[in-house]
Image: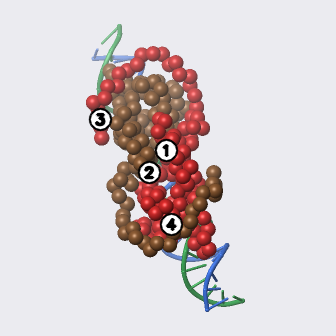
Chain colours: A brown, B red, C blue, D green
DNA sequence: CCGATCCATCGTTAATCAACGATAATGATG
DNA sequence: CATCATTATCGTTGATTAACGATGGATCGG
């Protein structure tokens, strides 16, 4: 993983970029990236994409984690806007928030 | 951020997907996402993209963080393969690892 | 109304992270 | 060789995370 074949020549231009703080855009991307920065959450997103929608209980059965832990991960994904949940009687049906996932994709793609 | 306009209908198919553990692919994406899951690291990547390359000391000046903290963030980005550093005399010149960043983009894009 | 089911939340514990200053290591310079 | 400059690493502290079991609130079936 330590690629060194790429040239990385030192630039000697003076600091033309002004000192700036961390921008809201940096924060936004970091927040979205953080939402999927855990293997279990990546898997949850992938499961929801495969099935298009899924009741919470099914997700728990498919994950090697306790119900409360899965619920917690789903909450994190929901707060980031990557997933959404819809109450269906006593159950909760989760699915991917298309717009949210698209936003993540766009922010990463334009790096 | 709580989009509820999207339909999320419960599916009643039995669990056709077998219980699987978390795959290496999930881990890989999570690891790459985690590398940019911090505003300072996103900013570092963006700075390196703007300037194409940059000596560590310059990065420190551009960031509102201590030298040791910036160095730590650069290490994390390097270990994830998103950035690479090249020793240039007493300095270290950092630049984005094109292949690594591309891998992150690809994994996110195919979600 | 009661019990059962489903899910979110709470409270706890152990582990990891983020930030810093101080120190060490490396290479250049005199 | 001694010194300076640059960067990585160490050690510490406080904050955050991840995981779990237990609890509680909501809804459905009888």
Q: Nearer the viewer, residue A41 or A13?
A: A13
Whether callout 1 and callout 3 share a subunit is answered yes
- Which residue is pictured at 54% across the width and 45% down the height? B103
- Which residue is pictured at 57% across the width and 37% down the height? B25
Look at discs 1 and 3 and give the one toward the viewer.
1
Label 3: which secondary element: loop
Query: Residue A58 at x, y = what percent?
Result: 47, 24
Label 2: which secondary element: loop
Look at discs 2 and 3 and give the one toward the viewer.
2
The span from disc 2 to disc 3 (Cα, nearest Å) is: 26 Å
Mark 1, residue position: B105
Label 1: which secondary element: helix
Q: Earlier in the sequence, mark 1 or mark 4?
A: 4
Mark 2, residue position: A111
Q: Earlier in the sequence, mark 1 or mark 3?
A: 3
Q: Nearer the viewer, residue B22 or C4?
A: B22
**Residues at badges 1 and 2 in contact (C-beta under 8 Å)?**
yes
Chain of the residue on which disc 1 is drawn: B
Look at discs 3 and 4 and give the one toward the viewer.
4
Query: Residue B91 at x, y = what percent?
Result: 58, 72
The span from disc 1 to disc 3 (Cα, nearest Å) is: 25 Å
Work out whether D15 lies above or below C14. below
Q: Nearer the viewer, residue B59 or D28?
A: B59
């Amino acid at each position: 993983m330590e690629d060194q074949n790429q040239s990385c020549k030192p630039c000697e231009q003076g600091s033309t970029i002004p000192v700036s703080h961390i921008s809201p855009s940096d924060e936004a991307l970091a927040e979205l990236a953080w939402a999927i920065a855990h293997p279990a959450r990546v898997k949850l997103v992938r499961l929801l994409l495969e099935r298009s929608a899924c009741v919470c209980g099914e997700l728990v059965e498919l994950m090697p984690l306790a119900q409360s832990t899965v619920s917690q991960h789903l909450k994190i994904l929901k707060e980031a806007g990557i997933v959404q949940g819809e109450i269906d009687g006593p159950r909760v049906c989760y699915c991917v928030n298309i717009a949210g996932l698209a936003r993540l994709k766009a922010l990463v793609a334009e790096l």
